């Protein structure tokens, strides 16, 4: 099963070249949207006090991201933009399972809305626990409560991690990640 993948790129731009850099980013994303199957979109965040642009690119699978990364288009775009960059970019891939875990202190990643995540997770957990209770209840009648609960939770977490959330996450991304200021 293929999972969506997100790449977060942090890049410092040479002072005075910000307008050119933003135009370069627009051409990069237009080309990706036009030429690469599986491209789900991008968002850009202008630098704050640290002076680093953050770009978030999403693809529907690792294979399609890697095809983009190996492409001549990407190589040409990076060569074209090289004069705009101040040093190398920091790249970070996320497969969607990071959705479940907090990053280490000091890590900066795009943050989804906590209220919307809570709403989605409440709905998903409720639906799975209800379905599992109805489906497994007759088979586990008479078992100790702790064992029934352990089995139900283990199945529910497995389904959420490997089936439900990888399928659901790309479909609700715009809801969970509210729009930020983009280029």
Image (cartoon, rainbow, N blue to C red):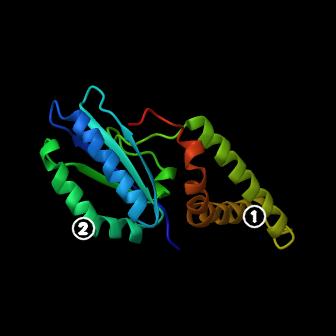
> Which residue is located at x 60 percent, y 50 percent?
172
Residue that carries the numbered disc 1 in the rendered image: 148
* Placement of 115 over or under 55, stated as above or below: above
Side of 94 relative to 22 (left or right): right
Percent of width and height locating residue 123:
72, 48
Side of 65 relative to 165 (left or right): left
Side of 181 relative to 121 (left or right): left
Give the total number of marks visible in the rendering.
2
* Placement of 180 over or under 102, stated as above or below: above
Side of 179 relative to 94 (left or right): right
Mark 2 Cα-neighbour bin, 10 Å: few <14, some 14–19, many ≥20: few
Circle 1: element type: helix
Circle 2: element type: helix
Mark 1 Cα-neighbour bin, 10 Å: few <14, some 14–19, many ≥20: some
Residue that carries the numbered disc 2 in the rendered image: 72
Q: Could one spot residue 163 in this view of the protein? A: yes
* Placement of 166 over or under 24, stated as above or below: below
Percent of width and height locating residue 160:
61, 60
Whole-angstrom CA distance, mark 2 to mark 1, is 54 Å
Mark 2 in CB contact with mark 1 (< 8 angstroms): no
* Placement of 77 over or under 70, stated as above or below: above
| Location of residue 183 by image quarter | top left
Residue nearer the viewer, 63 or 182: 182
The label number, if any, that marks residue 133 in the structure image: none
Residue nearer the viewer, 64 or 149: 64
Q: Could one spot residue 7 in this view of the protein? A: no
> Which residue is located at x 40 percent, y 65 percent?
36
Percent of width and height locating residue 12:
20, 39
> Which residue is located at x 43 percent, y 32 percent?
181
> Which residue is located at x 79 percent, y 62 percent?
131
Q: Earlier in the sequence, mark 2 or mark 1?
A: 2
* Viewer-side label of 2, 1: 2
């Amino acid at each position: 099963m293929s999972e969506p993948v997100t790449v977060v790129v942090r890049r410092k731009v040479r002072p005075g070249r910000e307008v050119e850099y933003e135009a370069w980013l627009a051409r990069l994303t237009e080309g990706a949207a036009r030429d690469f199957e599986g491209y789900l979109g991008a968002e850009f965040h202008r630098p704050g006090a640290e002076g680093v642009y953050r770009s978030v690119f999403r693809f529907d699978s690792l294979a399609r991201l890697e095809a983009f990364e190996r492409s001549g288009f990407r190589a040409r775009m990076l060569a074209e933009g090289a004069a705009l960059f101040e040093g190398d970019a920091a790249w970070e891939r996320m497969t969607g399972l990071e959705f479940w875990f907090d990053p280490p202190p000091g890590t900066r990643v795009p943050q989804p809305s906590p209220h919307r995540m809570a709403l989605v997770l409440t709905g998903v957990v409720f639906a799975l626990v209800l379905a599992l209770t109805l489906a497994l209840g007759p088979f586990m009648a008479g078992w100790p409560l702790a064992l029934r609960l352990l089995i139900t939770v283990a199945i529910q977490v497995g389904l959420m991690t490997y089936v439900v959330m990888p399928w659901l996450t790309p479909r609700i991304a715009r809801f969970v990640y509210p729009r930020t200021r983009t280029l």
